[in-house]
Amino acid sequence: MSEGPLIAVENVSKRFCRGLKRSLRYGVFDVASEFAPWRTIEESKLRPEEFWATNNVSFELQRGECLGLIGRNGAGKTTLLRMLNGLIRPDKGRIVMRGRVGALIALGAGFNPILTGRENIYVNASILGLTKRETTTKIEEIIDFSEIRQFIDTPVQNYSSGMQVRLGFSIAVCLSPDILILDEVLAVGDRAFQIKCLTRVGEMMASAAVVFVSHQIELVSHIATKGLVLESGRTIFSGRVEEAIKIYSVSGAETAKDNWIRSLDGISDIAIRLFPKQIGYRGSCGLQIEFRSNKSYEDCVARVCFEDKNDRSVAEWNSSVHMLSFAIQCGTNRLSLPLENLALNSGQYRLNVNIQPRKSSIYIISANHCEILVADFDAIAPNAIQL
Amino acid sequence: MDEIHNRTAIYTPEPQLRHPLRLAKSMGRDLWVSRELAWRLMIRNISAMYRQTIFGYLWAFLPPVLAAATFMLLQRGGVTAVGVLRIPYGLWVLSGAFLWQVFADSVIGPIRLVTTSKAMLAKINFPREALILASAGEVIFNFLVRLVILIGALAWFHVAPSWQIVLLPLPLLTLIGFGLMIGVLCSPLALLYQDIEKVVPLMLPFWMLLSGAVVPLKAVGVLGQVVALNPVFPLLDVSRNCLTGQPGTHFAEVAFILVATVALLLFGWLLYRLAMPHAIARIGG
């Protein structure tokens, strides 16, 4: 007799309302309609200002499988987890959860800051369904796992958030659930503890079905066996985790790496060129900007920001720092910016170029256009053998 | 495998009242399962309430004592004209104030506990009946603290408690149940609209004056009709009489209120049960 799937999600949808006051009013209506069970359920439609947070999602999970649920912020992952956890009910479809559910959607939700860690262990364990006797047999294991034994009898209000995470996770991890739900909780906590948690979760996986949400793709690829990619509430991929990760990265990459050029009216025929496109550490390159202008601007400055692959600005070249000023004249203009001695770490960078008059904050030209690769050809790792 | 069959949960958009037997069974099971959690929450709240204070459990009875003292002073100074009571006015006022405080605690307790537990409700699936039980437990604990003071007051005023004190639990529990029922009915709404949390403490002092807690009332005139309809009035009166050994009145009314309270409490529980998932969906987290 084989066991069926522990989680079965069939065509589940959930709608939410954008406006607060209207949302509260819908809440009241929904409660009222609970008391009219004779009404036939027509297919739920969207009321004004509503949208589908989860739209027709289906999947199944057996014991021993781990589903990596990935998607951009706002894709509907937490909503789906809350439905799996029984906190909110779907508006369409059906969810079947078989077995005891352990969820780490938030850590320390039952922590009372005035009580000590030890007392909070009992409270939190009780919330998660353990009896007092079960908690007492496991309390030493919990304290050992958290590695905060010397603070276990001080009030939680004196804990750092990392310590609270350690405590909360230790309690949740000592359950033996049939279904484990993890929502981006492993991101908190230091690296050593993350590894410890992952190992423990890996051990639990053998006897449970796990649903795991994270933005750290390496973690997802490490422990997930199946992947589900959500975007705006819809499933855009369901299947093997490696392909899911690829699809997620691509969809993220496409929207994040649009190239664009913006300029004031009167500027036209803009061309931006970078040469060379690949440099070494402390290398130099030249950025050439050509355009036509129907107005003249005096005393302009140019700024070039280097953004890494996470869209973080890591370095800036400013023409005024290099004592360069230029004026824009009517007609064709050609600017050559010497970007020299760039002390950038190896990696791919995008250049964000802004040209504005020194006295004004209005950009004449603003562009996210070129990419430069910094590759460190000459450095070798210490103690590495040169082949 | 049996474990799994016992713990299969199915979530659909269907109204749960379509299967009333299934609903009743799961409500009963949740109430049973929640008793340990309720105990833990109660201990947590009570110890937290008094831990970071210097005066500790003094706060449990100081407010009603002050109210009672104020009214005693007013009476002694001739500002109010209470008339003759069978027991010293001081005792009458003190017991009335304490009993009123029990009712007020029962009303505001569930509302407060639910609104402060928003984080827990939004993120963790636990039997929510625990919150109701925990607030009921807190109310009873606070009353027991005050009871100690009341026994002391009885001694001080040289009033010996009679056999009637044995009857005290009946009207008292009805009083608590009635307040709890109001609190439970309001708490899902209180999650959505913060007005509830503000309106209730505003209304309670007026209700107190219409309940004959600290000033004796006569059922005269229009306002007298309101007093006659106020369920707290007979409950409080009978509780006070049981406590101080006075002959009771209003027994029939208390019995009626008891039955109504039990029925309304069950309805309140049902409303709480059905409304909470919708309220939780709206509060985010």
Image (spheres, coloured by chain):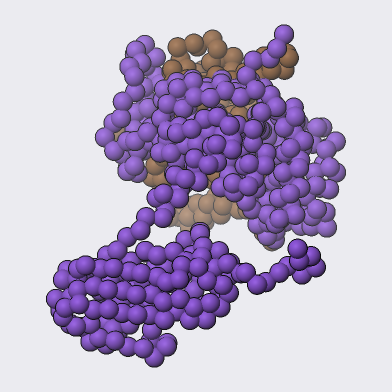
Q: Colour of chain B?
A: brown
- Image quadrant for the N terminus of chain A? top right
- Outermost residue to the bottom: A323
Query: Left or right: A100 with respect to A363?
Result: right
- Residue B175, image x and y in percent? 54, 30
Query: Left or right: B223 with respect to A153?
Result: left
Q: Residue at x 59, y 46 (%)?
A: A217
**B104 shown above or below A278:** above
- Residue B93, image x and y in percent? 54, 45
- Image quadrant for the C terminus of chain A? bottom right
Query: Left or right: B190 with respect to B163?
Result: left
Q: Residue at x 76, y 42 (%)?
A: A199
Query: Left or right: A370 with respect to B241?
Result: left
Q: Colour of chain A?
A: purple
Residue A63 is at least partly visible in this image: yes
In the picture, residue A256 is in which quadrant? Answer: bottom left
**A278 shown above or below B270:** below
The residue closer to the viewer here, B126 or B131, is: B126
The residue closer to the viewer here, A250 or A212, is: A250
